[in-house]
Amino acid sequence: MTNSYSAALLIMLGLFLLGGVISFAKQGLSKLIITAMGVCSALALASGVMRWK
């Protein structure tokens, strides 16, 4: 397990945003919002994984 709570928080944020992307896509909302949330999710997950050490 990690001692870095910020890494865990970033990973949880990325997964939360990913769930929002899936939900918004099922509802058929704006592609711009889905794309922006997807990019933010990918950035949060990537930064969380890179801090995981």
Image (tube, rainbow, N blue to C red):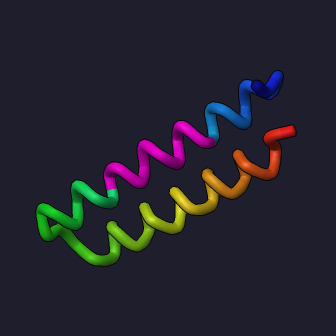
Q: In which quarter of the image is residue 43?
A: bottom right
Q: In which quarter of the image is residue 4?
A: top right
Q: Residue at 42% across / 50% down in the picture?
A: 17
Q: Does the magenta stretch include residue 14?
A: yes
Q: Main secondary structure of the magenta part?
A: helix
Please say if 38 is above or below 10. Answer: below
Q: Residue at 22% across / 73% down in the picture?
A: 30
Locate residue 48 relative to residue 24 in the image: left or right: right
Residue extent of the magenta highlight: 11-20
Q: How many labels does the image show?
A: 0
Q: Quadrant of the C terminus?
A: top right
Q: Residue furthest right?
A: 53
Please say if 7 is above or below 34. Answer: above
Locate residue 2 relative to residue 20 in the image: left or right: right
Please say if 13 is above or below 29. Answer: above
Where residue 21 appears, as percent x and y from the top left, is: 33, 59
Q: Residue at 68% across / 57% down in the picture?
A: 46
Q: Residue at 52% across / 57% down in the picture?
A: 41
Q: Does the magenta stretch include residue 6?
A: no
Q: In which quarter of the image is the N terminus?
A: top right
